[in-house]
Amino acid sequence: MTVFSSILDDHLRRLLAQEMLRVLRHGGSILWYDFHINNPRSPDVRRVTDYEIRDLFPGCSVELQRITLAPPVGRAVASVPILYWLLSETLVLCSHYLGWITRK
């Protein structure tokens, strides 16, 4: 989880994805969870966009859903569970993709 956002080099990201596909059998799946929004406070991570995920895993079925309320927002409203839930339903405030990548 959150592996690709921790790899800043595009070439290394591509090599990792290729290796994942090499060992994944046809019909097999990868569970994806990673940032799709940059963290302005951390130069050590870089988001992975929907387009990039699809490009990294060509020929695969990619299903992505935005989840996880952005941590700074979540911390600010954590003491009010209903507010946390309502804000987490606002996809623009969600900072991660949860996905299922299936090799055809």
Image (cartoon, helix red, strand yellow):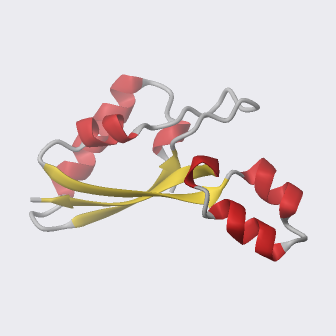
Residue 62 visible at all: yes
Residue at x 70% of width, y 67% of height: 86
Residue 2 visible at all: no
Residue 27, placed above or below residue 35: below
Q: Find residue 55 and report its horizontal and vertical position in percent.
A: 25, 35
Image quadrant in which you'd find residue 56: top left
Image quadrant in which you'd find residue 48: top left
Residue at x 25% of width, y 65% of height: 29
In the rendered structure, the answer to whether residue 72 lies left or right of residue 30 reads right
Image quadrant in which you'd find residue 27: bottom left
* Along the line of sight, the residue nearer the viewer: 40 or 88: 88
Please tell me how many numbered marks the rendered image carries: 0
* Along the line of sight, the residue nearer the viewer: 42 or 77: 77
In the rendered structure, the answer to whether residue 78 lies left or right of residue 10 reads right
Q: Residue furthest right?
A: 79
Q: Residue furthest bottom?
A: 81
Q: Find residue 21 and report its horizontal and vertical position in percent.
A: 20, 50
* Along the line of sight, the residue nearer the viewer: 97 or 43: 97
Quarter containing the C terminus: bottom left
Residue at x 78% of width, y 52% of height: 73
Residue at x 56% of width, y 54% of height: 91
Q: Find residue 28 and report its horizontal and vertical position in percent.
A: 18, 67
